[in-house]
Image (spheres, rainbow, N blue to C red):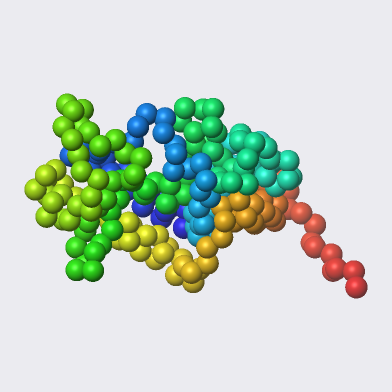
Amino acid sequence: MVDGLDEIYRGIDRAQQQWREASPFSCPEGCGTCCVDFEPDVLECEALYLAVWMLIRQPERAQAILDGTFLSPRSDADRGCMFFDPVNPYHCTVYDGRAMICRLFAYTGDRGKDGRPRWKPCRFLPLHDDDGTALLRKQYSEEDLLREFGAVPPVMSDITAQMLALDPGTQHIRRPLREALRQVLEKITMLMRFAGPPPDNSSPEPDAPQPLAS
């Protein structure tokens, strides 16, 4: 699931980059407003991806979550995401491991009743181009998008469907990020303990196992 989700995330980056290059819309430098009061509800595969990323990139923070000693960069972490840093200009402290919705917001569209792609700018996006041209904060149809920008952003539901296909049995189970992340960290570390160290092929054959005591 982690490998499959990584490929989906890479696909999101490619599709969104094409849209960014074609459209005049871009998030203001250091905005992060959409993250202040928001904590994503995630599927298990999203939590697994972030857990593996943290165990590799931020093992001390991962252990702190397991120990219950994790300290959020924000003093009001109960309001939103515990990984949001209001002081850091980039804000997200787990950016490369972040959840799906955090990757999709602002640069993906949806489908209207006719099934065709459409897109509406985030309410925090600037309403002017680099050259000062006024932009409309409206619902852009596929026709509008192609006529005005020559491109259509990726569609959120299409990408989400790819993610749901990774583990159909849990596709309706979503939990708050902080809850789901701790549970999968516990699962991963338990499996690591059971796996134990790799066998030493140079050592002599061990004695035959003894029967378990009753």
Q: Position of residue 134 (x, y in %)?
A: 18, 35
- The residue that appears at 15% across and 49% down in the rendered structure is 145
Q: Position of residue 47 (x, y in %)?
A: 54, 53
Q: Position of residue 136 (x, y in %)?
A: 20, 43
128 versus 193 height, above or below: above
- The residue that appears at 44% across and 39% down in the rendered structure is 33
Between 26 and 196, the residue placed more toward the observer is 26
Horizontal side, residue 158 vs residue 33: left or right: left
Between 142 and 98, the residue placed more toward the observer is 142
Q: Position of residue 48 (x, y in %)?
A: 54, 53
**Residue that sits furthest to the right in the current view:** 214
Q: Is residue 97 visible?
A: no
Horizontal side, residue 114 vs residue 78: left or right: left
Q: Specify the quadrant that holds the C terminus.
A: bottom right
**Residue that sits furthest to the left in the current view:** 147
Between 33 and 56, the residue placed more toward the observer is 33
Callout count: 0
Q: Is residue 172 visible?
A: yes
Horizontal side, residue 195 vs residue 109: left or right: right
- The residue that appears at 9% across and 48% down in the rendered structure is 147
- The image quadrant that residue 65 belongs to is top right
Horizontal side, residue 145 vs residue 111: left or right: left
- The residue that appears at 47% across and 49% down in the rendered structure is 99
